[in-house]
């Protein structure tokens, strides 16, 4: 999650450093022979009116100077603080933390920042403290109250978490991409929608997005995005992606707008998985197409008197509704060799293609259709367990065997294949 004011801590640290410099100048002035009394008075005034908690400790860890704000937070008078150590003024855990910080500053000789929580009149206050070593070997520090700032950050983080929960629940991924660098900030759901585990920094990239777009949609999606950037304003598009975790193809709807910031173009927007919506639209379209076909067949049956014309229309409709390459309607023919099916109508193929095709017989595969007991379906007739058990061919001839066959029972006398 991002900080709502990313430069806030840096600004506060800069302010603390300015106060440190001022304090060092006051301390230096207080040691001058002339005018020593006036300089010392300015230091006392500085410590009295500064809003921060300022303190100085001698090499033994005893307080030698403190500001009025420090006294108020400690709940002590000046006499109760001067000459005392952290162990004498604060509870053990907090005293140990303060002493550890002092030791770290003494060991490194460099200024350092620390953050502590202090209980003040039943409230937990957050303080950002800059400690540094004086030439005299004393440790000085300036502690600034950052409670309100930390509360604002926590509120922002809580708001972002609630927003993220809402986004996860709706499947919406939010993103902000810098088009110059190719990188940007994405929400966790922005990664998950692509089947990618969100990285800790939540940094996404154009390359990652392009990698997951379906190969057949990449060119179209890129062209739409570039056209939108050229004309400016909001943009929207629909495209397919291939999830990284499962390889599943999903439909996304993305929308957003372009803005300009610090000399670069930023694309900000959101993406929603609309796969179920697309599937519903396809089912509705298929149902509408089926209904239209059936209505056409019904109109022919109701108006046409020629049986051949009616059966041909039904055969054509069967091919269209099933998506088959071709369809044929057979009827029973009794002969000395037994009952067999004879081609009556054909759709999607030439009748000459069936000239060498033997008449289907009541074999193990097709017997249910002759008996009118069930519908027979087979994706590959040669792999059907009932195939090849009847003499004389033990299966169809290689030159005439179709790659697939579907036989549907109509009545005890008419069969459709």
Image: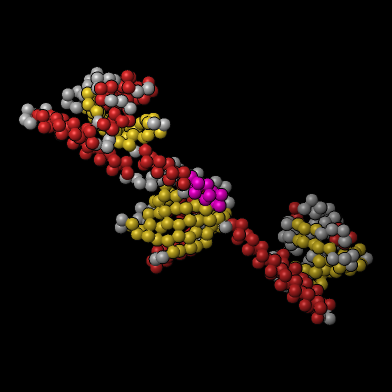
Q: What stretch is highlighted in magenta?
A: 161-171
Q: Compared with residue 299, is residue 318 higher up or lower down, i.e. above or below?
A: above
Residue 320 position, x and y percent, is 71, 69
| Quadrant of the image occupied by residue 55 | top left
Say whether residue 194 is visible.
no
Residue 364 position, x and y percent, is 85, 55
Q: Is residue 211 left or right of residue 6?
A: right
Q: Is residue 238 left or right of residue 355?
A: left
| Quadrant of the image occupied by residue 92 | top left
Q: Compared with residue 269, is residue 8 higher up or lower down, i.e. above or below?
A: above
Residue 259 in the magenta stretch? The answer is: no
Residue found at x 86% / y 68%: 414
Name the image quarter holding the C terminus: bottom right
* Residue most extreme to the left: 34
Depth order, front residue of 388/210: 210
Residue 262 position, x and y percent, is 31, 56
How many tags in the picture?
Answer: 0
Judged by its main secondary structure, the magenta piece is: helix
| Quadrant of the image occupied by residue 148 | top left
Residue 173 position, x and y percent, is 50, 52
Depth order, front residue of 261/9: 9
Residue found at x 38% / y 57%: 266
Depth order, front residue of 8/389: 8
Q: Is residue 121 left or right of residue 299?
A: left
Q: Is residue 83 left or right of residue 149?
A: left
Residue found at x 91% / y 63%: 338
């Amino acid at each position: 999650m991002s900080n709502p004011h990313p430069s806030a801590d840096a600004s506060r640290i800069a302010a603390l450093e300015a106060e440190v410099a001022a304090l060092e100048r006051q301390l230096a002035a207080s040691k001058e022979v002339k005018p020593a009394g006036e300089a010392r008075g300015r230091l006392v005034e500085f410590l009295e009116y500064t809003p921060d908690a300022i303190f100085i400790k001698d090499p033994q860890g005893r307080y030698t100077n403190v500001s009025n704000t420090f006294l108020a937070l400690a709940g002590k008078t000046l006499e109760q603080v001067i000459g005392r150590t952290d162990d004498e003024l604060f509870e053990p855990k907090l005293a140990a933390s303060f002493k550890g910080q002092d030791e770290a500053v003494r060991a490194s000789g460099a200024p350092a920042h620390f953050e502590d929580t202090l209980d003040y009149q039943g409230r937990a206050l957050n303080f950002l403290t800059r400690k540094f070593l004086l030439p005299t070997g004393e440790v000085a520090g300036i502690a600034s109250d950052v409670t309100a700032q930390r509360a604002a950050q926590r509120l922002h983080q809580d708001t972002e978490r609630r927003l993220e929960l809402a986004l996860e629940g709706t499947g919406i991924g939010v993103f902000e991409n810098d088009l110059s660098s190719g990188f940007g900030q994405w929400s966790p759901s922005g990664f998950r929608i692509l089947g990618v585990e969100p990285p800790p920094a939540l940094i996404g990239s154009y390359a990652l997005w392009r990698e997951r777009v379906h190969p057949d949609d990449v060119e179209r999606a890129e062209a739409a995005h570039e056209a939108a950037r050229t004309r400016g304003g909001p943009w929207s598009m629909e495209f397919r992606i291939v999830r990284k975790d499962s390889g599943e193809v999903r439909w996304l709807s993305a929308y957003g707008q372009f803005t300009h910031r610090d000399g670069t173009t930023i694309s900000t927007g959101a993406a929603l998985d609309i796969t179920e919506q697309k599937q519903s639209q396809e089912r509705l379209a298929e149902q509408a197409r089926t209904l239209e076909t059936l209505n056409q067949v019904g109109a022919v049956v109701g108006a046409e008197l020629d049986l051949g014309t009616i059966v041909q229309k039904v055969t054509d409709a069967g091919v269209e509704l099933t998506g088959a390459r071709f369809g044929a309607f057979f009827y029973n023919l009794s002969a000395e060799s037994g009952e067999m099916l004879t081609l009556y109508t054909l759709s999607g193929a030439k009748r000459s293609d069936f000239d060498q095709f033997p008449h289907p017989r009541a074999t193990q595969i097709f017997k249910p259709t002759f008996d009118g007991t069930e519908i027979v379906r087979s994706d590959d007739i040669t792999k059907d367990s009932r195939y090849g058990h009847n003499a004389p061919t033990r299966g169809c001839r290689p030159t005439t065997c179709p790659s697939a066959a579907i036989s549907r029972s109509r009545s005890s006398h008419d069969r459709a294949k």
